[in-house]
Amino acid sequence: MRVLRFVIVVGMLATSANAQMPLPASAPPITLTELEQLALENNPTTRAAQAGVEAARGRARQAGTWPNPVIGYSGEELKAGDLDARGEHGFFVEQTIPLGGKLRLGRQVFDRTSERAEAIVDVQRQRILSSVRTLFYEALTTQRRVEVQERLAALASEAVGITAQLFNVGVADRPDFLGSEIEARRGQLALNAAKNRAFAVRQQLAAMVGRADIATRPFAGSIDHVIPEIERDAALRAIVEQSPQIRAARAEMARTQAITAQARRATFPDLFIRGGAAHNRERGEDSGRPIGWEGQLEVGLSLPLFNRNRGGIGAARAEETLAQSDLQRLELSLKSRAASEFATYLTALNDSEAYRTEILPRAEEAYQLYLARYREMAAAYPQVLIAQRSLFELSTRYLQSIEDGWRAALRIQGFLTGDGLQSPGGADEGTDGMDMGRSSAGERGGRQ
């Protein structure tokens, strides 16, 4: 019975530090803080997001520069053959001067682009931290699940041995013996599934951190720490007011507004100035000597007669409307997803507490009583089988509720930003590519 008691103790997560998968003894434990730092340094999306900032800043500098001047040669009254004594030879400098604040407006467009890129850096940083934290606690949970399944498998093997002894003396029937073997086999399958899931989570965490050796390192942490308490209204306000995704969307809206302002000024006249000097070799009527150097100056304005940029203005206003709508959509989407995550969070908290304080202790007691009565030949084996199966399932569901609670809490605290390996320029919905694997693993655990 000591095996059974140890199973329940592990299932109730009372042995946190020792419930780890067998790992190389030489590998020192790594903390969550160290994993976060490694991920921020090694994750390629961090560099990609920062490169976007540098690109936007470079374009902002370029957008504020004046057009290059034109320098050239001018000549008049030239002809082939002998040099015409009356020819003029000189040079000129031509400069276009944008008017109406075009350069300033163009720079503002890329300043807003730079602000959006900086917000995307924050989004990606939050994605990485949230993903690392989620995978860290999921790895701890899978380690614990392996420990629980190992001890549940040992319990099932013990039941097979007891049933075999009773069958040999004619007390138990063959169906009872076959049923115990089936449960033992199911326990082994569940153990294999738990080990496979633990391996997959560790590989995912190693990929997120960008270090392959992380998959074989022990972790300095425990899921026995109290799941963070989150207040619903404050969490919803923080997601809308402090989310870097919202800040990026607002920067995008400001960028489209700057583009609209720039488009409206695109047809404002530009000033063209051309000046220079030419040496006139014609002789003056009075002096009879060459006239010499003469200055030239031309000034002009572009007139918006044919191109008033109406199509450009219309397109800019449409993009501005699109950005405004997308900001509203993002706010509503985050509120909706936050409500869903909060429901999962509350359900997991309630479930884990109920399993820990009420359900698992009763399941343990029921199994102990049925097993003792079966040994005394006062109970049928199907009753023991039902109690054993219930203990298996409840232990796994308890661990699943702990995992769900940590995941939901960390996602809410991470502003629902999504997967840390998602491209910085990707969708802002915060979808997590790892969810499918987690969900299916949870469903398998619940159906053991």
Image (tube, grey):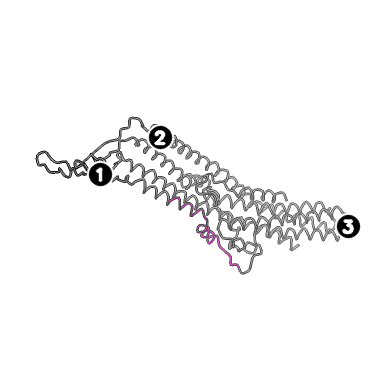
Distance CA(mark 3)–CA(mark 1) = 116 Å
Q: What residue sits 60% from the left and 46% below the top? A: 344
Count residues near mark 1 (Cα–Cα under 10 Å), then give few for <14, some for 14-19, many for 20+: some
Residue 210, percent from left and from top: 55, 58
Q: Quadrant of residue 214?
A: bottom right
View extreme (top): residue: 305
View extreme (front): residue: 81
* Screen quadrant of the N terminus: bottom right
Residue under pointer 1:
92
Residue 399, percent from left and from top: 65, 54
Distance CA(mark 3)–CA(mark 2) = 90 Å
Residue under pointer 3:
171
Q: Is residue 338 magenta?
A: no
Q: Along the horizontal axis of the image, is 32 left or right of 256?
A: right
Question: Mark 3 near mark 2, Cβ–Cβ under 8 Å?
Answer: no
Q: Secondary structure at mark 2?
A: helix
Q: What residue sits 60% from the left and 51% below the top? A: 405
Range of magenta residues: 27-53
Q: Quadrant of residue 274?
A: top left
Q: Sequence-wise, which precedes: disc 2 or disc 1?
A: 1
Q: Amino acid at mark 3?
A: Val
Front residue of 93/371: it is 93
Residue 262, percent from left and from top: 36, 38
